[in-house]
């Protein structure tokens, strides 16, 4: 760890979920929105060497290049986050998945959103493909204990006619992992994320935050946009590794048993829907 890394108040990590091709654009958006005294880390889970080298050399002067933290090839997002947290002493930790472009003001806004101590974890509004196509701004977000000891997750991810948008900064029970921030103290209370969760990691993180007593907030003035579709052929291998039916099924089963979830939609049909994107 360099002296600059030790001096950083905030650290941003770029984590691969199911594609590599969007990473340069995601990194450029991070640098364009970077708060002062912030370091940038790329978690390398198998980037093609030439692409990784290009990203490391892409930092605009006079900003320092990103650090690289190595993980096993195609490591899941929980494994990547754990490696990032262990690599830095920054007081604010921000995750940006590598197919996400933060909009201007997002990163400083996340830091500011943690500053008053109201929340331990914050997320912006997440859009899919383009600004305005909302993916995550939940009008309903609850984790409810049941009389039999089970747990019910109630999440309406985006506004709908029967669930209108809820304005203003507010507490929610779910985290969207495309982009979020937490204090270092929160990360320490949370501990290592479950590295056996190949997917369903959004709900796993939400439940882990609840178990650790962490307060989650959504900041609707902030925006980030993610791209759902992979680039063919660049992303085929990593994309098909992520969206594997057996691993997805195992993650579903583990999630339900670990947290005693009730009325949880455990179908893995979404895996086939994701793989259909490769054919478009």
Image (tube, grey):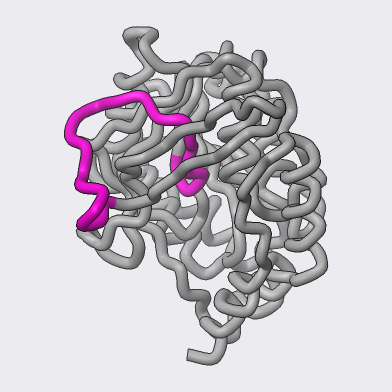
Whether residue 69 is visible, yes or no, is no
Q: Is residue 182 above or below residue 230?
A: above
173 is within the stretch colored magenta: yes
The image quarter containing residue 63 is top left
Q: Is residue 159 left or right of residue 254?
A: left
Point 44% across, 25% down: residue? 216
Residue toward you, 29 or 141 = 141
Point 24% across, 37% down: residue? 220
Q: Is residue 184 left or right of residue 167?
A: right
Point 22% across, 37% down: residue? 166
Point 47% across, 74% down: residue? 229
Q: Where residue 204 sits: x, y (%)?
A: 65, 39
Whether residue 260 is visible, yes or no, is yes
State whether the magenta stretch is mostly helix, strand or loop. loop
Residue toward you, 74 or 151 = 151
Q: Where residue 149 sits: x, y (%)?
A: 71, 26
Q: Quadrant of the N terminus?
A: top right
189 is within the stretch colored magenta: no
Q: Is residue 162 above or below residue 244?
A: above
Bounds of the magenta segment: 159-179
Q: Residue furthest bottom?
A: 279
Count of all numbered marks drawn on residues in the image: 0
Q: Where residue 227 sits: x, y (%)?
A: 41, 66
Q: Where residue 159 sits: x, y (%)?
A: 26, 51
């Amino acid at each position: 760890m360099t002296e600059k890394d030790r001096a950083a108040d905030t650290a941003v990590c770029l984590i691969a979920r199911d594609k590599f091709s969007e990473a340069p654009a995601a990194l450029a958006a991070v640098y364009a929105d970077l708060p002062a005294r912030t370091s940038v880390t790329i978690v390398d889970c198998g980037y093609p060497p030439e692409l990784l080298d290009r990203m490391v050399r892409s930092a605009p002067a006079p900003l320092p290049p990103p650090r690289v933290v190595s993980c096993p090839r195609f490591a899941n997002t929980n494994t990547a986050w754990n490696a990032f947290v262990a690599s830095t002493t920054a007081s604010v930790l921000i995750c940006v998945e590598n197919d996400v472009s933060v909009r201007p003001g997002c990163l400083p806004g996340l830091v500011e959103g943690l500053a008053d101590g109201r929340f331990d974890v914050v997320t912006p509004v997440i859009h899919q493909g383009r600004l305005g196509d909302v993916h995550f701004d939940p009008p309903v977000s609850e984790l409810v204990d049941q009389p039999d000891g089970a747990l019910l997750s109630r999440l309406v991810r985006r506004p709908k006619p029967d669930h209108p948008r809820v304005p203003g900064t507010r507490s929610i029970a779910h985290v969207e992992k495309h982009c979020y921030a937490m204090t270092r103290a929160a990360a320490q209370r949370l501990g290592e994320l479950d590295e056996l969760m190949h997917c369903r990691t959004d709900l796993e993180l939400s439940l882990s935050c609840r178990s650790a007593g962490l307060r989650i907030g959504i900041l609707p003035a902030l925006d980030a946009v993610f791209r759902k579709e992979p680039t063919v052929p660049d992303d085929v291998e990593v994309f098909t590794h992520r969206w594997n039916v057996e691993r997805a099924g195992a993650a579903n089963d583990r999630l339900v048993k670990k947290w005693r979830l009730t009325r949880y939609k455990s179908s893995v049909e979404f895996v086939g829907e994701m793989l259909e994107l490769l054919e478009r």
